[in-house]
Image (cartoon, rainbow, N blue to C red):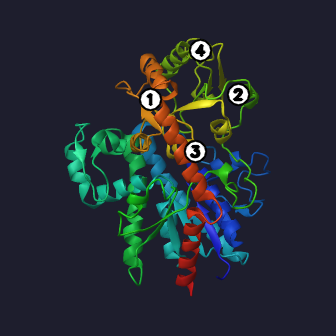
Amino acid sequence: MAREHFLVVAFPGQGHINPARALAARLARATGARVTLSAAVSAHRLMFPSLGAPDEEVHDGAISYVPYSDGYDSGFSLFSGGGDGAWGHVETFERVGRETFTGVLDRLDARGEPATRVIHAIGMYWAAEVARERGVPCVQYWIQPATMLAVYYHYLHGYEELVTEHAAEPEFAVTMPGLPPMAIRDLPSFFTNKTDGTLAALFFGIRRTVQQLDIERSSSKTRAKPMVLVNTVEALEASVITSLPELDIIPVGPAVVSLVGDGGNGGAPIAARDLYKHDEKDYMEWLDTKPTRSVVYVSFGSMSAVSKRQKEEMRRGLAASGRPYLWVVRKDSRDSDAAGGDLAAEQGMVVEWCDQVRVLSHPAVGCFVTHCGWNSTLESVSCGTPVVAVPQWSDQDTNARLVVEWGVGVRATVAADRVLEVEELIRSLGMVMGDSEKAAAIRTSSATWKAKVQEAMAKGGSLDQNLNSFLNKIAHDAA
C-alpha cells in the first residue's frame, strides 16, 4: 500500500490518550507509515514537561506529537463547575478545537506530509467533521468495549424511550439486539441520571460520536458499512462484535501502552507518557517483599475525585482486612486532613500514581479494587488479576457486568452515594482472595482469560490479523 500518514486525535484525558498512543505505536510498527498523535495542549504539556513551549511539537520515536488547543491549555476539571461549567466546556472545546485542529492539518499539509487518514477517538466528533469537510478519510476509534458501543448504538437507534421509561427501575431488564438481557443498573449512568447537567454535557459528546457512524455511512458513495476500530480482544467479545451488522467492527486491543511490543510481536514497550507524575516511593520493591497473591491493589482511575467518605471507608476497611495493600490516591484527590488520619496503616502503602500494569503483573498482587474504567478492566484481564468492581459512573456499570460475566471478579454492593463501605469491602475481598470454591474459580478464570489475551497478542494472533485486515481494507479503498 502507498505510505499512509495516520493522524490519531484524542480527548485530553489519561484514559483516552493511553489507548490512542498504543494504537499509534502499533500502526507505526505494522506499516512503517507516518503516525501523528494530536491531543490538547493541556495534556501534551504534561506528557512532555520539559518543552520550551507547551504547544511545541515532539518527535518521539516513530510517533510525532502535534497538539491542538481546546481553549483550556492549563487544564479543565469537568466536575468542578457543575452543569453550566460542563456545557461551557463542551461549547469551547468544539469551537476552539475545530479551529486549532484545522491548523494542525494545515501545518502537516504545508510541510508536505498531509494526513491521509484521521482516526478519531470518543468525544472527537468535531475532528471527524473537519476531516470530512477537507476530504480526508476518517475512521472511528472506540476506546471502550464493543459491548458499550453496541449499547450506545442501540440506545440511539430505537431503545432510548424504553430505557428512559424504566430508568428508575434498576432491575428492569432490557434486551437489545445481539446482547444478553441487561438490567438498568448495568447500563451507563447517562441513561438513568437525567438531572445532572455535567453528565448530560458529557453524554452529548458520546451521542455525537456515535452519530458520526450514520453520517459516515450516508456520505459514503457506496454506502459501505463504517469501520470502527475497537479497543477490545476478539475472544472476550466475539458474539458482540458480530451483533452489529450495520458496522464493520475491527477489534485491535488490548491497546495497553506498556504491552505494545509484548506477546512476541516484536519491539520494546513504548515509553510511558502519563499525565500524572509517578510516585517516587519504591512500591515495586515493597511488593517484592510480600507473599504471592497477598496484596490488595486499589485505584479509582484518573478522572473522578474520590470522596472524603470513600477514602475513610477504604482506609478502615483495608486496615480491618489484615491484608497488605497498595492504594493509589491522586494528589488532587487528597484532603488536607488525609480523611481523618494517615491513609496508610502499618500493612499498607499509599502512592499518588504508579505504573499500573507493572503492579498488576506482580505475583504478589492478588486483587484489584477498581472503579472499572475500561482501561483498568482490560489491564486487569490482560494481567490475570482478579477484580472487585466498584463502578462509579459512565460505562463502568457495564464494564462491571462484564467482569462478572467473564468470571474474573465480583461486583461489590455500594451505598446510594456509590461508596464502598467497610463491611462490603472486607466481604468482597474474601470472595476474591479467600479459600472458597468461588474464589478459586475466579482465579482460574482470570488465568484462563490472561492466556487468551496473550494468544491474541502473539505474532500471527487475532490482533495482528485484525490490524492487517484494517490495513488491507483501507489500501483497497485507496486503490
Quick one: 327 or 60, which is closer to the camera? Answer: 327
Identify the disc placed on residue 79. none
Q: Which residue does the numbered mark 2 point to in the structure image? A: 287
Label 1 with label 3: CB-CB less than 8 Å = no
SS class, disc 2: helix
Q: Earlier in the sequence, mark 1 or mark 3?
A: 3
Quick one: 284 or 310, which is closer to the camera? Answer: 284
Q: Amino acid at mark 1?
A: Glu
Please name the residue shown 36% across and 69% down the image: 214
Quick one: 46 or 251, which is closer to the camera? Answer: 251
Identify the disc placed on residue 337. 4
Q: In the picture, which quadrant includes the C terminus? A: bottom right
Q: Earlier in the sequence, mark 4 or mark 1?
A: 4
Label 2 with label 4: CB-CB less than 8 Å = no
Residue 293, horizontal then vertical, whole percent: 61, 29
User: Which-is-in-front pick, marks 1 and 3?
Assistant: 1
Q: Quadrant of residue 318?
A: top right
User: Which-is-in-front pick, marks 1 and 2?
Assistant: 1
Left or right of 320 in this view: 163: left
Q: Amino acid at mark 4?
A: Asp
Alpha-carbon distance for marks 4 and 1?
41 Å
Label 4 with label 1: CB-CB less than 8 Å = no
Inspect this view and state whether residue 12 appears: no
Q: Which residue does the numbered mark 3 point to in the structure image? A: 379
Alpha-carbon distance for marks 3 and 4?
32 Å
Alpha-carbon distance for marks 1 and 3?
25 Å
SS class, disc 3: helix
Q: Residues within 10 Å of mark 1 (few under 14, many from 20)?
A: few
Q: Which residue does the numbered mark 1 point to in the structure image? A: 437
